[in-house]
Amino acid sequence: MKYKLFSEKSGLRVSELSLGAGLTGHSKHTKQDYYEIFKTYADAGGRFIDTAEGYQAGKSESLIGEFVGSDRDDFIIASKYAVGRDRTEGFAKLGNSRKAMRVAIEQSLKRLNTDYIDLYWLHAYDGTTPIDEILRGLDDLVREGKILYGGLSNFPVWKIAYGSALSTFKNYVPITAISHEYSIAERTAEYEIIPMAEELGIGIGAWSPLGGGFLGRSIEHNFSHLPHWTESGRPNQVDITLKERLTAIAKEHNISVTQLAYVWLFHKARKSVTSIVPIAGVSSVHQMKEIIEAINLTLPNEVLSELDAFSSISPIEPHNHNFHHQQMTNGVKMFKIEEPQ
């Protein structure tokens, strides 16, 4: 596995695939099962682990701390706060406030059995807490040595852009990375999130590369574990048609649909001018091996172009409007300023 600079805002280097620990500690499997997944990832050179206080009510963090053990400094550990260990915990432990941040970081450090967290990001935007308060809180934690870098997960693009400018203006630690859903089945990040991150030099953790497991299951099992998919009637017929085409192409190239989805995502990551790192949440060693193998798989350019074409998303305003104007001007500035003679 190769390593890459995660952000132009820092010198943080991470492996090109992150192990998502969202399922780690779930009662569906044993502790040994999760350790074998971790070991398979680590043996392949994986060093970037993403967890959160809310994953399995904190059990994920505890197991990751145990698995990493004395090799702590060899791993990049990312964790999150904002949704608590239990979403009924009350106002003091939920949301983006400095109060919630302070409570969460102390508990996460204990569960992870570490003195510091490499990357600490907010799990979700609460729609209330001022971005200045969030940035100042992260800045304080960096100065105290409890975290090394700060980031935002699932935040609106305008909030991230404003926060990035504000951190520069007020000399806070920068927004190093953001985390956002991105897959061949969910490409809306391409509207604003990815262009913004590329412009500002912010790294991206791409979560749910398989649409909440939708793409990783057999063609007969069309459902996703993502609540917001279910609430909006997904997987819908468009999703199912996409999966059918992916299944046919994967069969033609003798790979799994899981691998095909990751090959597409790794291709997108390598074309981007910023760092996009897929976060792989897996529940078996077999799937972990599948994904690791996908890192070095290649497909002909025409296949990648085909994948892009049939998974494309309809443009929204103002992008649709601007696209037509850019076509009219052939991609050049509309007005030419004459150089003085």
Image (cartoon, rainbow, N blue to C red):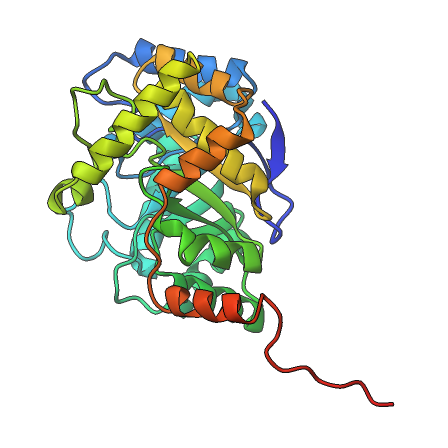
- Relative depth, front residue between 144 and 85: 85
277 to the left or right of 231 = right
**Quadrant of image for the C terminus:** bottom right
Give the quadrant of the N terminus.
top right
Q: Residue at x 33, y 20 (%)?
A: 248
Quadrant assignment, res 254: top left
x, y (%) of residue 3? 61, 31
Residue at x-position 30% and y-position 52%: 124
Q: Nearer the viewer, residue 336 or 184?
A: 336
Furthest-bottom residue in this view: 341
Q: Is residue 45 left or right of residue 310?
A: right
- Res 175 seen here: yes
199 above or below 184? below
Count numbered badges in the picture. Answer: 0
- The answer, for residue 20, to whether it is visible in the render is no
**Taking 39 as reference, is 225 left or right?**
left
